[in-house]
Image (cartoon, helix red, strand yellow):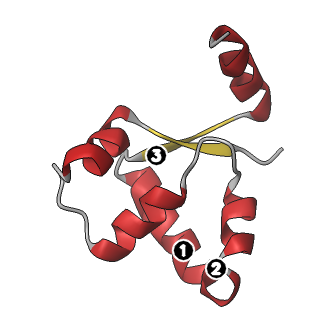
Amino acid sequence: MDNILIKTPKGIEEIESRAHKLSPKLRAALILVDGDSTLGEITMQCGEFAESIEQRLNELLENGFIEAIGIEQSATQDLRNF
């Protein structure tokens, strides 16, 4: 199963205030994380840059800016929002 990528509170804080001073390339990768797309979907959108985007997303994951959630968990979260 492919996991959906979501921003963590740390990632949201970076988007809102640049508190963690990510490089422009990492920040651009963070912006691509929309809470609805999987790693595969995001990298497919990036065409020839897919490999470098995947590396940046992995770095964001390792540093706690994003997390991967299972598709079933995501559907449950969506239901709680209603």
Residue sitting at x 67%, y 58%: 39
Q: Residue furthest bottom?
A: 48
Q: Do the residues under discs 1 and 2 have CB atoms within 8 angstroms?
A: yes
Where residue 38 appears, as percent x and y from the top left, is 71, 52
Residue type for callout 2: Ala
Horizontal side, residue 60 vs residue 41: left or right: left
Which mark, residue 50?
Answer: 2
As helix, strand or loop, the secondary structure at mark 2 comes to: helix
Which mark, residue 53?
Answer: 1
Query: Quick check: 55 above or below 68?
Result: below
Residue type for callout 3: Ile
Q: CA distance from mark 1 to mark 3?
A: 14 Å
Q: Residues within 10 Å of mark 2 (few under 14, many from 20)?
A: some
Earlier residue among tags 2 and 3: 2
Earlier residue among tags 1 and 3: 1
Quarter of the image where the C terminus is located: top right
Q: CA distance from mark 1 to mark 2?
A: 5 Å
Q: CA distance from mark 2 to mark 3?
A: 18 Å
Q: Residues within 10 Å of mark 3 (few under 14, many from 20)?
A: many
Residue 44 seen = yes
Where residue 51 appears, as percent x and y from the top left, is 61, 81
Residue sitting at x 67%, y 63%: 42
Quarter of the image where the N terminus is located: top right
| Residue occupied by mark 3 | 66
Horizontal side, residue 20 vs residue 61: left or right: left
Which mark, residue 27?
Answer: none
Residue type for callout 1: Ile
Q: Quadrant of residue 80?
A: top right
